[in-house]
Image (spheres, coloured by chain):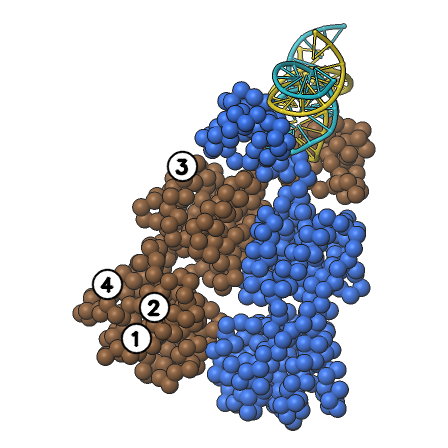
Chain colours: A brown, B blue, C cyan, D yellow
Amino acid sequence: MKRVSLKDIAESVGVSTALVSYVLNNKKEGRIGKAISEKIRETAKLMGYRTNQIARSLKTNKTLTIGLIVADISNPFSSSLARIIEDAADKYQYTVIFGSSDEKLSKFEKLIDTFLNRQVDGLIISPPDGAAAQISYLRQQQIPLVLLDRYFPEVPSNYVALDNHKASWDAVTYLVEKGRSRIGLINYRSELFHLNQRAQGYLDALRAKGITPLPEWQELLPLDAVPEGVPEAIDRLLHLPQPVDGLLFASNTLCATGLRHLNRLSLRVPDDLAIVTYDETESLDLFYAPLTYLRQPLPEMGRQAIDILLKAMENRQQTVQCQMEATLIPRASA
Amino acid sequence: MKRVSLKDIAESVGVSTALVSYVLNNKKEGRIGKAISEKIRETAKLMGYRTNQIARSLKTNKTLTIGLIVADISNPFSSSLARIIEDAADKYQYTVIFGSSDEKLSKFEKLIDTFLNRQVDGLIISPPDGAAAQISYLRQQQIPLVLLDRYFPEVPSNYVALDNHKASWDAVTYLVEKGRSRIGLINYRSELFHLNQRAQGYLDALRAKGITPLPEWQELLPLDAVPEGVPEAIDRLLHLPQPVDGLLFASNTLCATGLRHLNRLSLRVPDDLAIVTYDETESLDLFYAPLTYLRQPLPEMGRQAIDILLKAMENRQQTVQCQMEATLIPRASA
DNA sequence: GTGAAGAGTTTAAACGATTAAACTTTTTGC
DNA sequence: GCAAAAAGTTTAATCGTTTAAACTCTTCAC
């Protein structure tokens, strides 16, 4: 069942492959005989022709493919973005290949390698900790790229990210204004700038409100120790001499794990503990006190990422950096 | 910043491109001079050579790419499978391109088209309603493929799917044995075989237990009316002259929407209403009565799908059909 | 009638790899 | 010493497109 090529059509119609190509691509408008053009189209359809995109890519040096690297496609945050990017890319005929780095630099490098070998036209990347050098290499190689969700302030590059400092600031300010004064933060232990910004915003907001943040209010967990780590962290925060009365989760995963644990405790949200979390997941609704959360504008972020990427693919010069704002959605938990 | 090709290396070293190709691909082992082989490798590294996978694909007629079509990559069911498939594919050097059909035949056809133009080596597909003809076409074209989660009993093809009849049967039997006698089912209105099996298993299990299922116990919702539909359906079931005392959700989305509504009602789960649902999501844990659910063996399903696909890519003849069993995980809701 | 313009089509190279087959040089056996 | 085998390397075709340039007819103006 050999696939039909331009040549097959050309032979069948009795013309050159060039003509077939011109007709099927609507090039040389008007300069092609009506009758023959019809005949070619017909024959192509009849023979079930489909463009070999690989051959075309080789010749045109465009694959119409975008590489998407996320931390973990099975995380709702990533998969929501993936969906938005898929749709936006599709509008411009682009197809998306994806990979999950699992926050591991080695996996990340492997994915970059694979995607470059496949000649992707551009990359949308949520880089893991330590990927600054790779990003900088890609830029130097003039690979069109946009960082999404995370970036490295020391490495110039396009990015679309949340203003995490402000988001944390808003969340903490809100908690303080709701009367909380000892506010905990559960975050990852990592060098990732966006996570540090989440911490910094938290600290700065507390200080701005005249509260001196205690070091023990901040719980930092290794990236790979969430299931056990979060419950322990919560317990520590609740067993301080002065237990926290407010809590901010720095990610959906931390929060989901945390809520499961809180469900088992006797304390009551929000009376004993007010909670705000980053990110939106369906589970936030089902907790007995639906969670107050920081909504990231994912649709805008995804669309912006594609827009910037497309621009970068045309013009490799300029750098676009896009800071988005989170919206605090107040609900029952705080 | 032109990319480096075999030719560039060949010229730089002063040999033919053939030799460079042989060396870099470790072909013709032993038949190549040690010194020159070293030199070539060195130069390749120095010049930053990377294989142009597009050119290779054109020649070898293999793209090392798998097309994955799901209903919606942002649905946790799909993205979990995507992740498993990504990992399994990666083991064999395959990359995954994906697309969401949104349960629309037209989108599905477009995706198939795009993926075939891109010469994917094989397809893993969760087909939407009405896609039987396309599947049958693909088979006739000898495109290696595996259906996942759904299949068409009238169209022979490889598939990996749940034994949905048994899963529903188990769930209903469990509910009846827990003392429930009026059991509702919230399902989609569709021709999709797997959904019908979920309904059929439900009906058969009731009858096997000597219960005559009332038609009004079965609520069928259009695929695009979940947000409004589910609450209404629940209300109808609860306002029957003899309200239902057990309920089975046929999917994670139906359930998530349902739980949100149930949270607002005064009735108590499981006392007033026992619930079982298909699929696993983190939100099931956070409902005040953690949900009893039917766990699909996603890791096995994903791995099997890749296994079968790889086999199909070698040998287009045989058809493998793989029925998996769901596990009922009893928890607080029933 | 003739040269130029226009219309319609073909030629042929190129993209960057792979690989069978051919070729050249060295080694080996006797 | 010399043929044959082995070792090492090159030649050249090919995959299926795209596309500039060349080519061949008509048609038209004057």
SS under mark 4:
helix
Marking on residue A186: 2
The CA distance from mark 2 to mark 1 is: 10 Å
Residue B142 at what x, y percent from top left? Answer: 76, 49
- Classify the position of the N terminus of chain A by image quarter: top right
Query: Is the residue at mark 4 from the same chain as the one at mark 1?
Result: yes
Which chain does tag 1 point to? A
The CA distance from mark 4 to mark 1 is: 20 Å
> Residue tagged by mark 4?
A204
Query: Is the residue at mark 4 from the same chain as the one at mark 2?
Result: yes
Residue type at tag 3:
Gln
> Residue tagged by mark 1?
A237
The CA distance from mark 4 to mark 3 is: 36 Å
Residue A161 visible in the shown view: yes
Which quadrant of the figure has residue B322? bottom right
Task: Using residue A233 as the reference point, say whether residue A297 is left or right of it.
Answer: right
Which quadrant of the figure has residue C4? top right
